[in-house]
Amino acid sequence: MSLIVQKYGGSSVAGPARIKRVAERVKRYKKKGHALVIVVSALGDTTDELLELSRQVTRSPSRRELDMLMSTGEQASVALLAMALHELSCDAISFTGAQVGILTDAAYTRARIVSVETRRIREELKKNKVVIVAGFQGTNPDGEITTLGRGGSDLTAVALAKALSADACEIYTDVEGIFTADPRLVKTARKIDRISYEEMLELASSGAQVMQSRSIEVAGKFDIPVHVRSSFSNKEGTWIVKEDRSMEGVLIRGVSVNRDEAKLTVTAVPNRPGVAGKIFRTLADGGVNVDMIIQNIGKHASTDISFTVPKSDAEPAVKLLRKIAGKMGFRDVSFDANIAKVSVVGVGMRSHAGVAAGMFEALGKNGINIEMISTSEIKISCVVKKSDAEKAVRLLHDEFISGKKPKK
């Protein structure tokens, strides 16, 4: 008998009819003799709706109370799915993250899993029950409820697959797998059959929203094959696996866009050693994640430093830095939310030259200005105006994947 961990996203359980459909799929797997652990996200847009409710109460909700609020969405989902399975005469039991012993650190709204206690899950599996676990949540050492960040149910599923030594980890969503670009933006985007952990991590961290980047980190670290597929069909999806030599034959695996970042600029920073370190230490201690960084060449007494952060961190970052402006001697901090980051990703870049040139030329010939650039061994990212983002994605997909040259 194989043990399978399945995760169903919010779109897969967005209402009673879809919950019943998921229950029917789970029952079919159970009839085949599989032991099943099901991880469920909140129904539909519940998390966004809860966040909006919090904003109507306060502009600055405490992170602890946000976690208390947002964790309720998954608790409703697991109970409803268990009820739907009971209706199909399929024995099931639902649990919150705390009840199954998902222990996290103390970072509210973006906690990391420290350990998973599997005793209670194994006990219920021995009773031949389907075990349903609330995704996205756990508890810290003080017993406080924490959440795992956007898309955290993916991380719950992968962590449970590792802790239980599962035979498979399936991530069900509303698309048929990982595509070379968002098919809503690029009509010629096609499904990828196999993608490496490294490529998927770069795509996820660059804006592809099919899976949470931290879940890919864990899957890659422990070599857990992940099958991303649609909950609305039985077609094979995309396998996220170890890199193999055949993958190097594909120059660019995918193009992604992230519209959820803001660019901050610290102006007139004293041009002396240690100042930049103190600026970014202040942000790190405040829990602000920094992505791309550019510092102008310091030929004068001062310089400017620009960097990107998640849009939700922009205002807190500005407040943190303005508090130390006088002490550090820089003039001010500004931010621009009207940007997007466009990236091309592929392990084939390791053995092929000219990707950067092709990317910059394709954008430049079509009037798209590049504000910032960052690179890794298998990724090149450019910050552009948000209004140019969709056009940039289509141009780059045509340049590197569809085989068409971008039109001037």
Image (tube, helix red, strand yellow):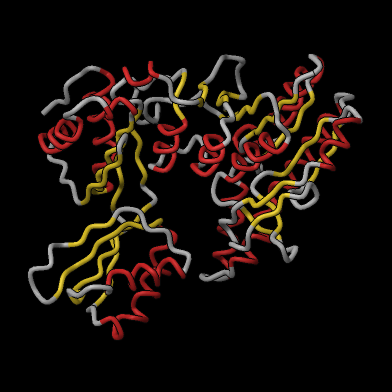
Q: Quadrant of residue 54?
A: bottom right
Q: How many labels sit on residues?
A: 0
Instruction: Find residue 339 and report its horizontal and vertical position in percent.
Output: 28, 51
Q: Nearer the viewer, residue 122 or 129?
A: 122
Instruction: Find residue 323 and report its horizontal and vertical position in percent.
Output: 37, 81
Which quadrant of the figure contains the C terminus?
top left
5 relative position to 211: left or right:
right
Q: Nearer the viewer, residue 350 or 307?
A: 350
Looking at the image, residue 307 lies above or below residue 134? below
Q: Quadrant of residue 226?
A: top right
Residue 159 makes an appearance in the image? yes
Instruction: Find residue 88 and report its horizontal and vertical position in percent.
Output: 85, 24
257 relative position to 104: left or right:
left
Q: Residue at x 24, y 30 (%)?
A: 396
Q: Residue at x 42, y 43 (%)?
A: 205
Looking at the image, residue 193 lies above or below residue 206? above
Q: Residue at x 27, y 73 (%)?
A: 274
Residue lying furthest right:
127
Q: Nearer the viewer, residue 192 or 119?
A: 119
Residue lying furthest bottom:
326
Which quadrant of the figure contains the N terminus?
top right
Residue 176 makes an appearance in the image? no
Q: Nearer the viewer, residue 151 or 346?
A: 346
Q: Residue at x 43, y 66 (%)?
A: 284
332 relative position to 14: left or right:
left
Instruction: Find residue 369 and report its horizontal and vertical position in percent.
Output: 15, 46
